[in-house]
Amino acid sequence: MKISTLALALAASFSLSIYAIEPASIQTESGVDITPLLESKFEYDNNIFNRSAGKTSSTKLVVKPSVNFEMIDALDEYSIGAYIESGTYLSSSNDNYFDGGLATSIHLEPSARNRFDFSYSFDFDTEQRGSGLTEGFDELLEEASNFREQNADVRYEIGGVDTSRFAVLANYADTRYTNNRLLTRYRDVDELLFGGEFLYSLSGLTDLSIDATHTDIRYDIIDASGVSRDSDVSEVRIGLRWEATALTTGVAKIGYQSKSFKAAERSDFNGLSWLIEAQWSPLTYSTFVLTSEAGAVDPDAFGDYIDQKGISVGWEHAWSERFGTNVIYSFTNDDYEGVTREDDSQELVLALVHSTARWLEVSAYGTLQDKDSNLTQFKYDKTLIGLNFKVSM
């Protein structure tokens, strides 16, 4: 995941779980719980194409129904979910979208010393003009780009949870664009990862972690420049996983990453990488979250790679049984190799959340984004203001 999406990922999972809605499930005789959910959002965006000048604003209506099926059998868990999402721009109908996807996961523990996890997701998604491939050049396209992504993840772990244990890892991901092919065909890509992780118990709640991974990145069509973007990425990291109390959890790892291109014309990357994900709840109704990541990633458009460093900090607080707030701040530095470009991106999200009933949550939010760059066309600022509704059974 690119670090520039850290704040979005944090916001997606950081929705005042302290007093979030409690959907009622349909319980079947077979033991499967069915949980439907409806989310809708009414949002104003003053710069929908992320332009440095000549901004276009629009109000957007988003409707997202979803359903999840879950079954728990002792220590084994099975789930599958699906969603569709419709987005309508009142001032830019060419950018309307209709997305959807499904995801499934399995957790098995056949014995006290064996654990198996599998997850798979398939999504049809939309890349809005002015982002991704058309960042800074939204005028290149007359409509948004559609793509589909699939991701499969496997982990098999052997050993006692309070002793030393070892895990084998594998992941496959691919992205395929389905329109605007004159431009998007160069970004169809497959990624295949293999690796392992050794965990040594320092105490009943803290583990020393050492992991190593290797990823093959392969593009379907050679870049428009005529130089292949195919590369191999190897990474070794050491760190800690901890759960000091039921309210304090996290992982912190630092290591070395090597990204080697197949084409000699591109510059390789060798340097530090790290990952930090920590949650601290000093009070049962107040939680802080810190996420930071660094490493080399592929650019959406120009350059060989991006040396990316980012941090995101969030605070959620329940002021009463029904009212709370979210604050999320993120900063990302993108230093491009192969082109003379460096970006600094900041984002601040503020949200007021009201748990109107067990089955209804209403939130008002505002987002401020500011991107600075040594290249004028990539500079922009934008403001988003919206209302979000979550309705369950």
Image: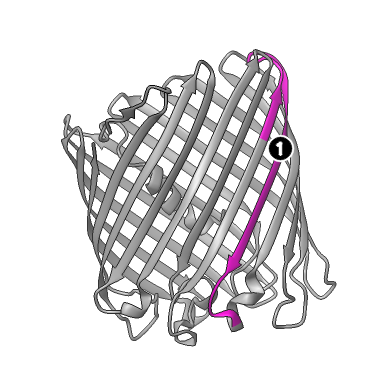
**Residue that label 1 marks:** 169
The residue that appears at 85% across and 72% down in the rendered structure is 264
| Relative to 245, residue 120 above or below | below
Q: Is 252 left, or right, of 369 in this rendering?
A: right
The residue that appears at 70% across and 70% down in the rendered structure is 304
Q: Which residues are magenta?
A: 155-181
In percent of width and height, residue 312 lies at 45, 48
The residue that appears at 59% across and 36% down in the rendered structure is 252
The image quarter in which residue 177 lies: bottom right
Toward the front, the furthest residue is 29
Nearer the observer, 257 or 114? 114
Is 171 magenta? The answer is yes
Is 117 magenta? The answer is no
Colour scheme of the rendered structure: one colour
Q: Residues within 10 Å of mark 1 (few under 14, many from 20)?
A: some
In percent of width and height, residue 270 lies at 76, 56
Name the kind of residue labelled 1 in the image: Leu
Nearer the observer, 363 or 127? 127
Residue 302 visible: no
In which quadrant will I find the C terminus? top left
Nearer the observer, 244 or 232? 232
| Relative to 16, residue 343 above or below | below
In percent of width and height, residue 113 lies at 69, 15
| Relative to 352, residue 367 above or below | below
The image quarter in which residue 139 lies: bottom left
Q: Main secondary structure of the magenta part?
A: strand
Secondary-structure class at tag 1: strand
Nearer the observer, 292 or 25? 25
In percent of width and height, residue 320 lies at 16, 31
The image quarter in which residue 120 lies: top right
